[in-house]
Amino acid sequence: MIKVGIVGGTGYTGVELLRLLAHHRDVSVEAITSRSEAGMKVCDMYPNLRGHYDNLTFSEPEAKRLGAMDAVFFATPHGVAHALAGELLAQGTRVIDLSADFRLRDVDEWAHWYDQPHGAPELLQEAVYGLPEMHRERIKSARLIAVPGCYPTAVQLGYLPLLEAGLIDPTQLIADCKSGVTGAGRGAKVPSLLAEASESMKAYGASGHRHLPEIRQGLKDIAGSDTGLTFVPHLTPMIRGIHATLYSQLTAEPEDLQALFEARYANEPFVDVLPAGSHPETRSVKGTNTCRLAVHRPGNGNTVVVLSVIDNLVKGASGQAIQTLNLMFGLDERRGLDAPAVMP
């Protein structure tokens, strides 16, 4: 049995880890931390977990106790994992960080986007970007995983086959993305209130969003050269989901775009390429670790449109974190993640 701890268990990604791990037969959640809720039972905060974690109580984050775990998930705001990750790694614990702390390799760029100095630059070279479809073999032997963000996951998986094949201009990429309100986290914020977010949709971060450098870094790794990306996120009145509409320009005549995508993802358990002409819906991935894709070439012209949908809390966060855990411990990466979507 793999013993795990969760640092920061009161937010949406923390409770999603608990929900998914409740049916993972090889994992036991031994510790979950929250400074503000220390002493409270998990099932008192989240009644949906009654019968699964009745004896699990939030506690203060103690490095000694967490260091006794086989792996620790950080479901925390940025900057928290910096302080504890190195100490846990020194004790032999593997770290899976769902925050942005280790996603960017450039410390100056991280400091620019997150408004503070990087707290553990010595660990950046060791951190493995946790997108299995790109880095599966490295993830298997990693000690420190940087779980990708939700927008970056949807965007990179959509562009991956086209960039790998060298079929599109990497300097002319447009990602028009929509997210559910849980993407803003569980903290009380006026823009996330029902009366503010319902019956409306708005763009935000159009002049610069924190996920932009992460997406650019990943696309550059795929393309092998600098990319030009326009990324505009939007807030939509739904609880879960990411919908990314991705535009690019062909630089060579493709034989069959549908076949290209199907071949690239044929052996990927969590990427589903839909039949030609499809339009994936966010509800079709609700509660799952699946990314559903569809590729279009309007009017048989030079523009390629890829539609990519994920659940921002699962494939965009906690599910992908568990997928990397499975790989790190030699398990089938589908373990605990094979439930179908919740509909309606």
Image (tube, rainbow, N blue to C red):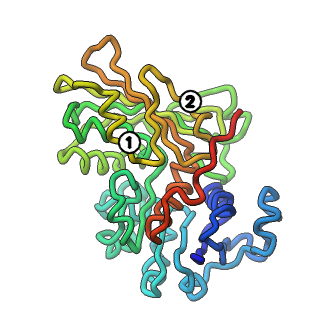
- Tell me the kind of residue under disc 2: Glu
Q: Percent from the top left, x then y, of residue 96?
A: 48, 67
Look at the numbered disc 2 and give the secondary structure of its residue: loop
Q: Label 1: few (<14), some or many (≥20) within 10 Å?
A: few
Q: Looking at the rendering, in which quadrant would you find the N terminus?
A: bottom right
The Cα–Cα distance between marks 2 and 1, rounded to whole angstroms, is 21 Å
Q: Label 2: few (<14), some or many (≥20) within 10 Å?
A: some
- Tell me the kind of residue under disc 1: Ala
Which residue shows up at 59% across the image and 46% down it?
A: 288
Which residue shows up at 16% across the image and 26% down it?
A: 252
- Dividing the picture into quarters, in which one does residue 49 lie? bottom right
Q: Looking at the rendering, in which quadrant would you find the C terminus?
A: top right
Look at the numbered disc 1 and give the secondary structure of its residue: loop
Task: Tell me which label, 2 or 1, sits earlier in the chain.
Answer: 1
Q: Percent from the top left, x then y, of residue 122?
A: 32, 76
In depth, the one of 337 and 312 nearer the eye is: 337
Would residue 135 appear left or right of 335 to someone viewing this image? left
Which residue shows up at 27% across the image and 35% down it?
A: 162
Mark linked to residue 250: none
Q: Which residue is tagged 1?
A: 266
Would residue 234 appear left or right of 257 to someone viewing this image? right
Q: Measured along the vertical axis of the image, is residue 18 above or below residue 28?
A: above
Mark linked to residue 281: 2
Which residue shows up at 78% across the image and 77% down it?
A: 39
In depth, the one of 161 and 5 nearer the eye is: 161
- Dividing the picture into quarters, in which one does residue 22 lie? bottom right
Would residue 313 appear left or right of 298 to someone viewing this image? right
